[in-house]
């Protein structure tokens, strides 16, 4: 099985097995290190018995800047999953679920209202996975991705902003059942 632990800077050279999926976003090295520096407890890896990274999750805790608190797009204190991915040979073993549950536990421990994430609207497997974990579509972010994962003739792709309420959101104020009907522009999300 896998060993779960916090990310370490030396892991950067071991992420490539996980990042080969066309649905997985790959970032510049400084981006990974920024998450490590700011939110180390929300950057976890799964490694196999040989020390290979076979999955990881990067997350953060944040809210929208106060200047936007009266905007309809304002986000209160919440956790955000920036990336979660599992190497192809390690999929269907529950690694993604365990990584996500660890981040959700940290969100609850930090009194977050919800956990959110963005997923490509064509990534049906990931959408089904998140729904099985209690996430729902909150809104559609039009043309969020600057490329299209499966159609090279298209220049962009929509994202679903999916959310799962945490313990703090007793009244379920930060989710909605018909999120597919709410469309926003990338400039509306922070």
Image (cartoon, rainbow, N blue to C red):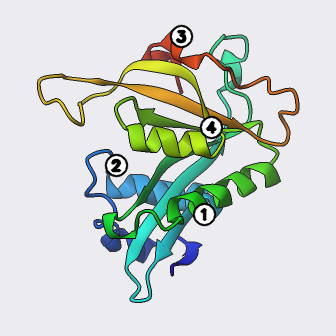
Residue 182 position, x and y percent, is 54, 11
* Marks 2, 4: nearer the viewer: 4
Could you classify mark 4 by the number of other residues whose Cα lies within 10 Å: few (under 14), some (14-19), or many (20 or more)? Answer: many
Q: Vertical placement of 7 versus 168: above or below?
A: below
What is the C-alpha distance between the residues marked 3 and 2? 26 Å
Q: Residue at x 44, y 44 (%)?
A: 126
Q: Is residue 59 left or right of residue 145?
A: right
The tag earlier along the polypeptide, 2 or 1, is: 2
SS at mark 4?
Answer: loop
Circle 3 residue: 181
Q: Residue at x 55, y 66 (%)?
A: 44
Residue 179 position, x and y percent, is 58, 18
Residue 111 visible at all: yes
Q: Residue at x 32, y 52 (%)?
A: 28
Circle 2 residue: 24
Tag 3 and tag 2, C-beta contact below 8 Å: no
Tag 2 and tag 4, C-beta contact below 8 Å: no
Circle 4 residue: 135
Q: Vertical placement of 134 versus 65: above or below?
A: below
Q: Residue at x 77, y 36 (%)?
A: 113
Residue 68 position, x and y percent, is 66, 17
Q: Where on the picture, by quarter, is residue 120?
A: top left
């Amino acid at each position: 099985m896998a060993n779960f632990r916090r990310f370490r800077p030396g892991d950067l050279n071991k992420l490539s097995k996980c990042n080969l999926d066309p649905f997985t976003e790959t970032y510049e090295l400084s981006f990974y290190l920024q998450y490590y520096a700011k939110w180390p407890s929300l950057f976890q890896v799964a490694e196999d018995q040989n020390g290979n990274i076979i999955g990881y999750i990067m997350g953060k805790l944040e809210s929208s800047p106060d200047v936007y608190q009266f905007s309809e797009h304002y986000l209160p204190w919440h956790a955000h999953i920036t990336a979660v991915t599992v190497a192809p040979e390690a999929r269907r073993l529950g690694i993604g679920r365990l990584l996500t549950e660890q981040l959700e536990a940290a969100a609850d421990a930090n009194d977050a209202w919800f956990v959110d994430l963005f997923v490509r609207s064509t990534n049906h497997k990931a959408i089904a996975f998140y729904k099985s974990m209690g996430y729902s579509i909150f809104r559609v972010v039009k043309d969020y991705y600057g490329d299209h994962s499966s159609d090279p003739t298209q220049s962009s792709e929509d994202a679903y902003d999916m959310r799962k309420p945490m313990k703090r959101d007793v009244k379920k104020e930060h989710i909605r059942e018909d999120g597919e009907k709410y469309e926003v522009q990338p400039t509306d999300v922070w």
